[in-house]
Amino acid sequence: MENLILIDNTSSEEFVVNYTGYIENGFDLISSNKIENTQAYIKYKTLREGLVKYEKNYLYETNVGAGLPIIDTIRILHKTGENITRIKGVFSESLSYLFNLFSEIDTPFSSFLKNAIAYGYTEPDPREDLCGNDVARKLLILARELGLENEFEEIEIENLILEDLRSGDTKTFLDTIQDIDPHYTALQNELEEGNVLRYIGDLSGNLREEKGDLSVKLVSVPKNSALGNLKGSDSIFKIYTESYQDNPITIIGAGAGDEVTARGVFGDILRIAEKK
């Protein structure tokens, strides 16, 4: 058999150990699973060496922006010699939805969180979204596209869950979800006039060195800025380069969801097929 493609749409940590074996047996890889690309850098590098050795492709556009062309854009810019100096934005559909509405409507934060759960924007346990790890993984994937050797543990992550609500089962958290409200009401009241809250992933520093500075945190931004103007559950990625320093490349759109992710995976299949 020829032109074999393995497509991994799971979130399994166990299955990714099989990637190398598939490459050695003639498979190209496509994955919406982020695990492989956010493991220890030595494992990340070993897989790339296998891809080169066996002349195989590994595409994972959906790892970061679902159907948005984020990884492909960054990869092309980097390979053509454009010096990318910073990447920042709102990378999470669920957190985009939460803070876009929370900034516009005078309603307790927990009300928006309950709606996000009902609409399927969050994981069944929303703490998996609120802890910031998903945004951090996406940021790490982008950093490694630039040749940076950062590890996940080196990312500065602001956990949006109050410390006393982080333990316990999902039901207990959901039953006491309103306990999160005073904290976010206070943050909103402390905002400068004309500013809103956004949960931002930010890759900065000297990106020509081995490692960059990666942070994921809640920040105050002007409402009339690109980040502040974000609507609905859209994601936004701002790519700063030497050529686009004052006017960064900006990509906005649906950054998650079954349909856009499926289109992104299908797009990766077509890219590999065109190379055959």
Image: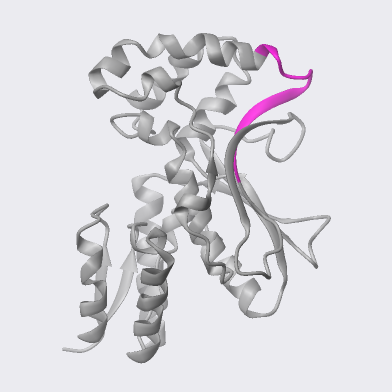
Evaluate whether residue 135 shows in this view: yes
What residue appears at the point 31 percent right and 18 percent down from the top-left corner? 173
The outermost residue toward the left is 1
Q: Is residue 159 left or right of residue 189?
A: left
Evaluate whether residue 67 shows in this view: no
Residue 190: say if magenta. Answer: yes
Give coordinates of residue 19: x percent, y percent: 25, 72
The outermost residue toward the right is 246
Near-viewer residue (153 or 177): 153
Residue 113: say if magenta. Answer: no
What residue appears at the point 68 percent right and 11 percent down from the top-left corner? 189
Give coordinates of residue 236: x percent, y percent: 60, 46
Q: Where is residue 186, by image quadrant?
A: top right
In the rendered view, would you say 27 is above or below 198?
below
Give coordinates of residue 185: x percent, y percent: 58, 11
Q: Where is residue 170, by image quadrant?
A: top left
In the rendered view, would you say 189 is above or below 55?
above
In the rendered view, would you say 51 is above or below 15?
below
What residue appears at the point 27 percent right and 57 percent down from the top-left corner? 9
Give coordinates of residue 30: x percent, y percent: 33, 69
Image quadrant holding the C terminus, namely: bottom left
* Span shown in magenta: 189-201
What residue appears at the point 36 percent right and 35 percent down from the top-left corner? 128
